[in-house]
Image: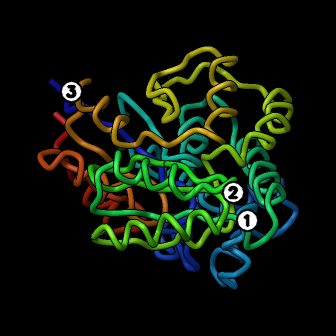
Amino acid sequence: MNTLLAIVFPGQASQRVGMLKTLAAHYSLVEETFSEASEILGYDIWKLVQYGPFTELNKTYRAQPAILTASVAVWRIWKQQGGCMPQIMAGHSLGEYSALVCAGSMDLRSGVRLVMVRGMLMQEVVSNGCGAMSVIIGLNDDVVFEFCKAAQQDQIVSLAGFNAPGHVVISGNKAAVDRVNLFCKNAGAKHVFTLPISVPAHCALMKPVATRFIKELEKIKINTPSIPVLNSTDVCIEQEPRAIRSALMRQLYSPVRWREVVQYCIHQRIEKFLEMGPGKILTGLIRSIVSNVFSLSVNDPVSLSEAMKIDWN
């Protein structure tokens, strides 16, 4: 019996200058994929990814297409090299778009255009410096939830992501997020740090974005995925284009239920996870959720070679 595999794709905050540099030196498919994306974006995204500056790459509407394109490039190389096909794909927030592109639900051009517009709309909804997201490690979900309620004071702050046990993300107005950060530090949280993102994703501040974004979603052709894609909004696999659009719209203001996504995969007897794209954030989270499964991030020649050597039988 073949080993059951899930391939997962990272979200925003995984971007860095120089990502996929060593992979591109060995596989022309990397730059070819970025060239496709550049045609849609109207600028050389590979140049930005390789040379920065990071302040420009870190802008939401630049980072999102960069991460998606990087993830798709790794997947294309995996397929080109005859890599094992997964039973499930999933993505963390933005990574869900990467999963849908790789599963054939939308083409790369549509995916790149969508996440560029998504990033622009998200950036527009709040003034620079008025929104924030923070990671809280070492407190129970319920404790952080109560702190969010206490810190609102006519502003918005809420749980925006359930990444792993004792590892949550909060999002909202910066002043309210700062108040929750202080509450959590005083309560003995192991780590409290603000993400390098000015956009408060996955909270009610994004609802105005969702109503505008659905119009963009309706402009593109969405197919039934050839590989099941597990969404992190409802923790379910959607096949119908209409349901996929709905989940992508609601994802903007709904928390990312990553912990449940991984648990769903385990219940489906998934034995190995490969993370395709920049960084290894999801690999670390998976190991925090389930300690006895194999998880590997693939984004350079060494990790690709390691993954290709795995016995999938």
Percent x, y for residue 19?
A: 53, 73
The structure residue drawn at horizontal position 20% and vertical position 37%, both measured from the top left corner, is 271
Residue topped by disc 1: 62
Percent x, y for residue 166?
A: 28, 54
**Depicted 26 relative to depicted 97: above or below:** below
285 or 110: nearer the viewer? 285
Q: Which amino acid does label 2 sit on?
A: Pro
The structure residue drawn at horizontal position 37% and vertical position 59%, both measured from the top left corner, is 298
Q: Residues within 10 Å of mark 1 (few under 14, many from 20)?
A: many
172 or 216: nearer the viewer? 172
Is residue 100 found left or right of 207 in the rendered image?
left
Helix, strand, or loop for circle 3?
loop
Percent x, y for residue 101?
A: 61, 38
Residue 215 figure quarter? top right
Residue topped by disc 3: 269
Measure how far apart labels 1 and 2 are at the Cα level. Answer: 6 Å
Q: Which amino acid does label 3 sit on?
A: Arg
- Callout 1 touching callout 2 (CB < 8 Å): yes
**Depicted 145 relative to depicted 34: above or below:** above
